[in-house]
Amino acid sequence: MNQDYIIPDNWSIIEEGFSASRIESSESLFSIGNGAMGQRANFEEQYSGKSFQGSYIAGVYYPDKTRVGWWKNGYPEYFAKVLNAPSWIGINVSVDGEQLDLSACKKVENFRRELNMQEGWLARSFSATLQNDIHIEVETKRFLSLEFDEIGAIQYSVKPINNNVNIIFQPYLNSAITNKDSNWDDKFWDTLEVKHENRQAFIQAKTMKTDFYTCTFMESEVFLNNKAVSINPSRQTDENFVAFSYSQEVKKGDVFTIHKFGGYTVDRNHDKTQLVSAAKKALKTATDLGFDGLLETQKQAWANIWDLADIAIQGDVKAQQGIRFNIFQLNQTYLGKDSRLNIGPKGFTGEKYGGSTYWDTEAYCIPFYMATKGEHVAKKLLEYRYNHLEKAIENAAKLGFKNGAALYPMVTMNGEECHNEWEITFEEIHRNGAIAFAIYNYHRYTDDYSYIPEKGLEVLIGIARFWQQRATFSTHKNKYVILGVTGPNEYENNVNNNFYTNYLAKWCIQYAIENVMKMESEYPSDHTRIINKVKLSNSEINEWKAVADNMYFPYSEKHQLYLQQDGFLDKELIPVAHLDTAQRPINQKWSWDRILRSPYIKQADTLQGFYFFEDDFSNGELERHFDFYEPFTVHESSLSPCVHSIQAAKLGRMEQAYTFYLRTSRLDLDDYNHEVHEGLHITSMAGTWMSIVEGFGGMRVKNNRLSFTPKIPKQWESYSFKINFRNHILKVTVNQKQTTFELESDTELEINVDNKRVLLQKKRMQTLI
C-alpha cells in the first residue's frame, strides 16, 4: 500500500493534519536546499517524538572506517559519510513556562505544511492546546537563499488565542549533533569555539580526520504585530551550544514574531581563520535585506530557474505535481556553481549512500542539466571526473591493474573508492562506462568538442586501458569475456558476461580509439601532448582493438535475444505478476541468497544498454527484449521506471509508459518502495525529466540534429517543456491533436519531427499536426 497523504496541487507539496507516524517521511518530502547546503524539514521548535534530524553542508564529509568482519586486498578503508552538520534552525518556544512540543500538546489542530516549489519556501501552520491549557496559533516560513547561498531565513509567529501570555523565543545553535548513519559511533565533529556578540552567535567546528573548518551562525530580530521591538536577550552557552532568549508579554490576539537568519561559512570557500568575518558579512546581507527582501530575491531566483526548467502538464494534477517536485529537488541539490561538487543519490535529504557520487550523475543527471541550464553546468560535472582521474588510476592499481588503467569509484567524495560491499566495489564496474558515455553524450548534445582535447581523452584512454585488462580471452569461446561482475541489476552478483557490461566495454574502447584518431588528424598538438603524457602506443591500441572486435555477448537463439548474463536461463523464470504482493518489495522481505537465485531484476540492465545505444538495435529487437525482461523486473531501484517509460513510449505503448512515468515521478511522494523516511531519490528524478522529454517528447540528437517523435498519454490534455539546445531556447507543446514548436532564439534552427525536416524560424511558433 503506497502512502497517499500528499494533497495534489500544481505548484506545492501539501500535508494537512498532524500525524506522528509520518513525521520522518514528511521530513524527507519537505526538505529544502540551495546547492550549498540543505536540511530535512525538522520542526524549529522542540519535538520529543520520533524524528530524523538532518542539516548538511555540500562537500563536507567524514571517512567512517569500513565495518566488516574480514578484509581483502584492495578493499576500501572507509565509507564516506555526509555529515549531519551543526544545526542553526532551532527555536525553542515557551508559553507561560510551557514548552511548545507537538508530541506533548493536549491537542493539535489545523496542521498544514506546504513546500511552495514555485517560490522556493517551506511553511507550516497549526493551532495547539498546551498542557497548561493555553491555546495558540503558529505560523512559520523558511527558505535557503539561492542568491546568497550561505544564508537561510526563518519567520516564526505565535498568536495566543485564549489568554494574555508570556512568550519566550529561544533561537540557538547546536554542534552536539550525531549522524544517524555511523559505522562505529565515532565523534565526527570537534567544536572549536562558541561565542556571541550582541545579537549574533557563532560556533566554529571542524570535522575529525578530514579537517573541514566551518562556522555556524545566527542573528535574530523580534516583532510584535509586525513592528520591531527592542528586547535585550539573555544568553546561554556551553561547549556545544549557544542560545538567546527573547521574552515578551503578548496580549490575546496579538502576534509575536521572530526572524532568524542563519547558515554556514566553510573553509572550502574562505580562509579558515576568516570564517567568523565571512559569517558577519553574510549576516549583514541578510539583515540589510530583511526577511521579506530575502524572500523576494528567492522568488525571483526560482522564477528564473522555472522559466527554462518547467514542464507544464494540463489535465493531470498528480502528474504535474510529480514532475515539478522532481525538477525542484534537482535544483535544490545542484546548481552547477562549483565543479568540486556533485550530486548524491539522496542530495541533502538524508544520510543513506553517504551523500556520495555514483554513476547516476553521468547516466541520468547530465542530460537534465545540459538541457535546462546549459553546457557550462554539464561541463562542470565532466570536469569533476577529470579532476579525479589520478585517483581512478590509483583505485585500479589497488586491484592489480597497470599502465594507467582507470577504474572510477562506485561511490566517492574525493575520487577514492569508499563503498563497502564487495559485490559492488569490485564488481559493479559498469560505472566506468557511464563516465565515458557522459563525454559522448555531452559532445553529441552540445556539439562542443573542446572538452575532449582539453581533458576528456585522458579519461577515455584510462577507461579503455581498464577494459582491455579486465577482459579475459576464452579459448573455449574464442572470444573475450568479462568474468565476475555485477551489472545494474544488483539482484545478481558475481555473474559472467553481463550483456550491459560487455557491450559498454566494447563501446568504450571503440569510442576511445575513434577520438585518438580524430585528434591525431584534427588536433595534432593536443594529440602529441596527451599521447606523450600517457605513453600510448599503436601496439597498445591494437591490443584494445582485439578485445573490442572479439567481445563475447551471451545470446539465446531460441528466444532471439541477448541474455542478461551467461546463466540467466538457468533460473526458474516465474514472472513478477505471479509473486504474492505480500512478498514485495523483495529486498525487504527475502533473504539475499533467495534474491540472488531468483530471476528478478532490480532495474533496467540489458534494457539499460538498449537505452544508451538504441541506434545499434532495431525496434523489433527492442520489443523482444522489453517483452522478455520487463515481466521479471521488480523496479525496486529508483533508476528503473524512467528507463522503462522511455522505452515503452518508443514502442508506442503509451498506457504502460504513462504508468511507469507516474511511478518514477511520484516514487517518493507516494513512497512506492517504502523507504522515503530515509531521504529522497534525487538522481532518479533526472530520469523522470527524461521520461517526458525523451519518452513522450521523443527528443534525440540524430545525425547532429535535434529530433522529436512526440506522443501524449490519453490522460493529459497537453504538456510543454523548454530546452536549451546549443544556445537555442526551444519550447515544445504537445496536445492531443498537434505539436507546436516555438523558437525563442534569434537564429534559425533545423530539426526533425517524425523523421521530417522542419526549419524553425527565429522567435516564431510553428504547429505540426
Image: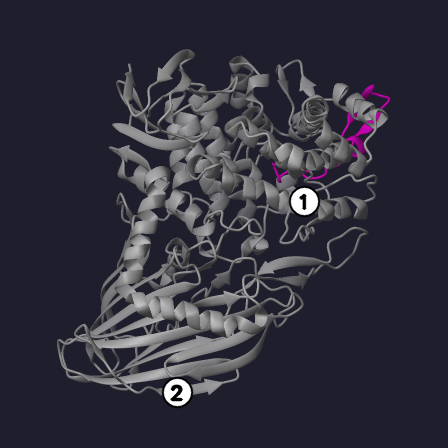
How has the structure been colored for display? one colour
For residue 424, which numbered disc appears in the image?
A: 1
Image check: 752 left or right of 338? left
Viewer-proximal residue among 85 and 715: 85
Image check: 252 left or right of 397? left
Viewer-proximal residue among 193 and 695: 193
Viewer-proximal residue among 44 and 756: 756
- Asked whether 270 falls inside the magenta stretch, the response is no
Where residue 379 sits, quadrant-wise, is: top right
Q: Where is residue 235 shown, x and y percent of the image? A: 39, 87
Residue type indicated by callout 1: Ile
First to last magenta residue range: 468-495
Image check: 219 left or right of 488? left
Q: Which mark sits nearer the N-terminus, 2 or 1?
A: 2
Viewer-proximal residue among 16 and 195: 195
Query: Residue at horizontal 26%, vertical 45%?
Result: 9
Identify whether 456 is placed above or below 130. above
Q: Quadrant of the N terminus?
A: top left
**Which one is closest to the eye, mark 2 or mark 1?**
2
Q: Where is residue 199 shown, x and y percent of the image? A: 36, 81
